[in-house]
Amino acid sequence: MDAKETAGRAPGPGDRDFPARHAPGCAGLGELDALVTGCRACPRLVAWREEVAGVKRAAFRDWEYWGRPVPGFGPPDAAVAVVGLAPAAHGGNRTGRMFTGDATGDFLFAALHEVGLASQPTSAHPGDGLALRGVRLTSPVHCAPPANRPTPGERDACRPWLAAELDLLSPGLRAVVALGGFGWQALLPVLAGAGWRTPRPRPVFGHGAHVVLPATERRQELHLLGSYHPSQRNTFTGRLTLPMLTDVLREAAVLGGLPVP
């Protein structure tokens, strides 16, 4: 296809501008999720997620890996959003559900269940009966990255999906929990671009950090909370314990007006 033909067509799933052109026009989370799962805008991530899905890990040799971008998970009227980093190669990239099928997800869902935001403390696969209550899980990057490290360019290319998701959640959204510094730094420009007033200089990430974004003409007040990421590095070393994560999620639930045990 020559340059003239390319200029006259809408970006396809493999075009760099696919998220930016299509995410803002989504009328609902179902439409957004369907577009996310078909995205091929980042060649390095596409190659990696598909290689992992083909080679597989020995423990999961009988699985048919998802091998595509992983959409957000949770109800469309969620009062709380939890934003991580990216799907794990043999977790979300295998199961097709955010934070599902790996140790990080096990830790997170145990905490969500303790606070009453998840119907069960484990998340094994999409057909396991798990339901979320008042919370939606998502990430700044929807494809599993090599070494769990997206590039800044990949983060920025994926940003319109997160921006559209938060916009669609905004009527009921009261609190956002960022898991780790990557999620925190990725969230701030998205929130600013979506019409919330973020502090200057930008607030520093830390476990237990709490920033109130005041209401504007476009947006209601929003609470931004920080937690260390429930990676195995953090949980095995004790940097993040289950009570620490539970406390942050409970605070977010209370701020969101959700009932907690």
Image (cartoon, grey):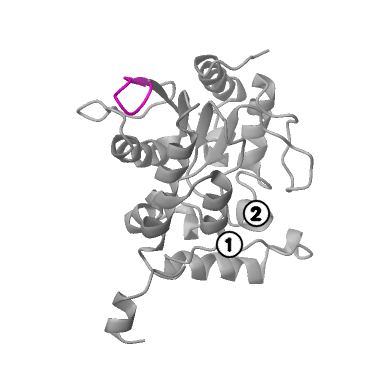
Helix, strand or loop at mark 1? loop
Q: Position of residue 37 (x, y in %)?
A: 56, 59
* Observer-nearest of 259 and 184: 259
Q: Position of residue 62 (x, y in %)?
A: 79, 64
* Observer-nearest of 214 and 68: 214
Assign the magenta stretch its main secondary structure: loop
Q: Position of residue 153 (x, y in %)?
A: 33, 58
Q: Residues within 10 Å of mark 1 (few under 14, many from 20)?
A: many
Q: Residue at x 38, y 26 (%)?
A: 206
- The answer to whether residue 10 is above or below residue 161 is below
Q: Residues within 10 Å of mark 2 (few under 14, many from 20)?
A: many
User: Three-letter amino acid code at disc 2?
Assistant: Gly
Verify CB contact (< 8 Å) between mark 1 and mark 2.
Answer: yes
The image's mark for residue 79 is none
Q: Position of residue 96 (x, y in %)?
A: 65, 54
The image's mark for residue 68 is 1
Q: Does residue 215 belong to the magenta stretch?
A: yes
User: Three-letter amino acid code at disc 1?
Assistant: Arg
Indicate the quadrant containing the N terminus: top left, top right, bottom left or bottom right.
Answer: bottom left
Residue position marked by numbered label 2 in the rendering: 96
When asked about the image quadrant of residue 34, the answer is bottom right
Indicate the quadrant containing the C terminus: top left, top right, bottom left or bottom right.
Answer: top right
Helix, strand or loop at mark 2? loop
Labels 1 and 2: the sequence-earlier one = 1
| Magenta segment boundaries in residue numbering | 210-220
When asked about the image quadrant of residue 14, the answer is bottom left
Q: Measure the alpha-carbon separation of dots 1 and 2.
A: 8 Å
| Residue 87 visible in the current orientation | no
Q: Does residue 42 belong to the magenta stretch?
A: no
